[in-house]
Image (tube, rainbow, N blue to C red):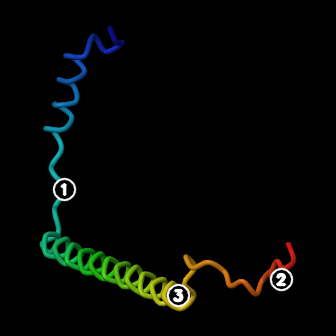
Amino acid sequence: MTAAGGPRDREEEIRRLLEGRPHPAVPADLASGAAARGVRLLRRRRAVQRLGWAVLLAAAVAFTVWAVLVQPWATPSSSVAPPLEGW
């Protein structure tokens, strides 16, 4: 039990407080402003996604060009170590 006499009494008291007060006035352009803000957020999100995909694509192309030019999978040339002769 709470000091107010229980959850039922407290709920009724809150309802009376809320019903007794007039509701605040809502600005007339609230919905259109919210819609415009949503459009801006979606546009920004799409731009960031496109930029991310472009950066990812550029990184993939750069890696492919590097791999084709350097060929890191190929064995190093034999000029690194002297040839073994006379064994």
Q: Nearer the viewer, mark 3 or mark 1?
A: 3
Q: Amino acid at mark 1?
A: Pro
> Observer-nearest residue: 13 or 86?
86
The residue that appears at 16% across and 61% down in the rendered structure is: 25
Determine the image quadrant of residue 3: top left
Q: Amino acid at mark 3?
A: Trp
Q: Nearer the viewer, mark 3 or mark 2?
A: 2
Which residue is label 3 attached to? 66
Which residue is label 1 attached to? 24
Residue 8 against residue 26 in the figure, above or below:
above
> Observer-nearest residue: 9 or 54?
54
Residue 74 location (% of width, % of height): 57, 79
Q: CA distance from mark 3 to mark 1?
A: 64 Å
Q: Residue furthest right?
A: 86
Which residue is label 2 attached to? 82
Give the mark, 3 or 2, whose residue is nearer the N terminus.
3
Query: Are the residues tagged 2 and 1 within 8 Å (C-beta)?
Result: no
